[in-house]
Image (cartoon, rainbow, N blue to C red):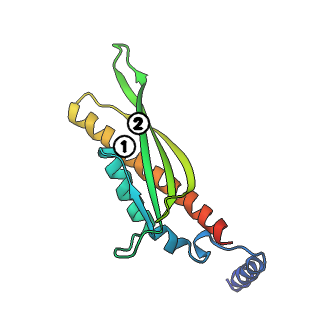
């Protein structure tokens, strides 16, 4: 036990000297993410990704937005598993989120990007179960797209600061 603690302490010292800085440890990244105002398109997918981005950016109310992000979404659904009677039992859902980050108040383009999320879900014979599965897939895709956008922007903001 004591040997494990000593080796853990030496491993920590080794990382301290390598210059490693956690992404959110870079000064100003979290506060810059919180200062992004998100504009999403209408619809369920727009509402879902907006909620996940607001959670990811840890929005603080009251302060002026340093950036405005406009999102456009593309959705597609493809049948993948087909039974002998030609009824799909599995679908692939694809969500593409394209964003433009603009500095405020000038409106100058600061960053542009796109993320694509692909996932599959089962489709049941019961209509309600099929709708619930489709909506769950839409929510999971919106959550993943928001996570990827957050990581792209955090890395970009850290590079701007460093």
Between 20 and 122, the one lying in front of the other is 20
Question: In the displayed structure, does residue 108 sit left or right of residue 137?
Answer: right
Element carrying mark 2: strand
Question: In the displayed structure, does residue 36 sit left or right of residue 158?
Answer: left
Please state the horizontal and vertical placement of residue 82, each as a whole percent of the image: 40, 20
Crowd tier of the residue under label 1, counting other residues whose Cα lies within 10 Å: few below 14, some 14–19, many 20 or above: many
Residue 98 marker: none
Compare marks 1 and 2 and give the one earlier in the sequence: 2
Element carrying mark 1: helix
Question: In the displayed structure, does residue 101 sit left or right of residue 81?
Answer: right
Q: Nearer the viewer, mark 1 or mark 2?
A: 2
Please state the horizontal and vertical placement of residue 145, each as a whole percent of the image: 47, 50
Quarter of the figure with residue 17: bottom right
Indicate the quadrant containing the N terminus: top left, top right, bottom left or bottom right: bottom right
Quarter of the figure with residue 93: top left
Name the residue beneath numbered marker 1: 138
Indicate the quadrant containing the C terminus: top left, top right, bottom left or bottom right: bottom right
Residue 75 marker: 2
Quarter of the figure with residue 56: bottom left
- Position of residue 106 relative to residue 149, above or below, is below
Q: Residue at x 40, y 58 (%)?
A: 38
Disc 1 + disc 2, Cβ < 8 Å: yes
Please state the horizontal and vertical placement of residue 131, each as a whole percent of the image: 26, 36
Q: Residue at x 36, y 23 (%)?
A: 88
- Position of residue 125 relative to residue 107, above or below, is above
């Amino acid at each position: 036990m004591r040997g494990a603690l000593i080796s853990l302490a030496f491993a920590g010292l080794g990382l301290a000297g390598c210059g490693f800085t956690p992404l959110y440890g870079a000064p100003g990244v979290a506060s810059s993410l919180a200062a992004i105002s998100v504009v999403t398109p209408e619809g369920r997918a727009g509402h879902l990704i907006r909620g996940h981005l607001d959670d990811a950016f840890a929005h603080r109310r009251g302060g002026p937005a340093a950036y405005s992000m406009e999102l456009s979404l593309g959705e597609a659904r493809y049948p993948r598993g087909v039974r002998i009677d030609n009824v799909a039992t599995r679908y692939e859902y694809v969500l593409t989120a394209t964003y433009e980050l603009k500095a405020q108040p000038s409106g100058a383009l600061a960053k542009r990007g796109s993320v694509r999320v692909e996932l599959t879900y089962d489709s049941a014979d019961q209509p309600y179960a099929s709708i619930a599965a489709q909506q769950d897939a839409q929510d999971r895709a919106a959550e993943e797209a928001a996570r990827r956008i957050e990581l792209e922007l955090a890395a970009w903001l850290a590079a701007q600061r460093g």
